Image (cartoon, rainbow, N blue to C red):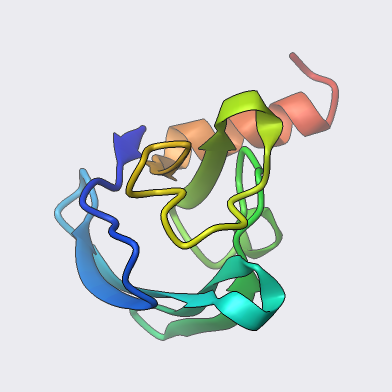
Amino acid sequence: MLRLNEITDEAKQKRTVILPSGETFILQIDYLPQQYGWIIRELIYEEVTIRNLRIVNSLNLLHQFRNLLPFGIACISDDDIEPYHAENFLLEASKLYVLTEEEVEQYGSFLRGEI
């Protein structure tokens, strides 16, 4: 897992993420104060664009897109409290990770009861 560091408490953040394979994707996350939460406003990888996906505690937020993306994104929070506040990532109460293709497959195996 590759941790996405340097997430601040700014309401709109955009970055290019480099995968272990050398490929990249663009990730824009936004904090919505009226909804007390973070969303993936836009994720762009090659021809695939995903918009407006709420960030919640999950071992793979992108599981439903596993046939389109060779990676996943996990959100893990202290005490399993969802990232409700703008400063959750800045204070490291919540952390985002990029999963490799192998880790995505392991998670799928876990969900299918194979592990």
Residue 15 position by quadrant: bottom left
Q: Is 81 displayed left or right of 5 in the figure?
A: right
Q: Position of residue 79 (x, y in %)?
A: 65, 25
x and y, in percent, of residue 51 in the image? 56, 84
Q: Locate residue 43 relative to residue 50 in the image: left or right.
A: left
Q: Is 23 rendered above or below residue 101?
A: below
Q: Residue at x 39, y 40 (%)?
A: 100
Residue for point 58% across, 51% down: 83
Residue 19: image location, x then y, percent: 24, 51
Q: Quadrant of the C terminus?
A: top right
In this picture, is 16 found above or below 47?
A: above
- Image coordinates of residue 103 in percent, x first then y, are 49, 32
For the point 68% across and 38% down, the residue is 81
- Could you say which is closer to the camera, residue 69 or residue 29? 29
Name the side, left or right, on which 34 lies relative to 27.
Answer: right
Asked which quadrant contains residue 104, the reply is top right
Residue at the image position 71 percent from the left and 28 percent from the top: 109
Tell which of 57 and 18 is nearer to you: 57
* Residue found at the far top of this picture: 115
Q: Is residue 62 left or right of residue 109?
A: left
In front here: 104 or 2? 2
Quadrant position of the N terminus in the picture: top left
User: Is the residue 20 above or below the residue 12 in the image?
Assistant: above
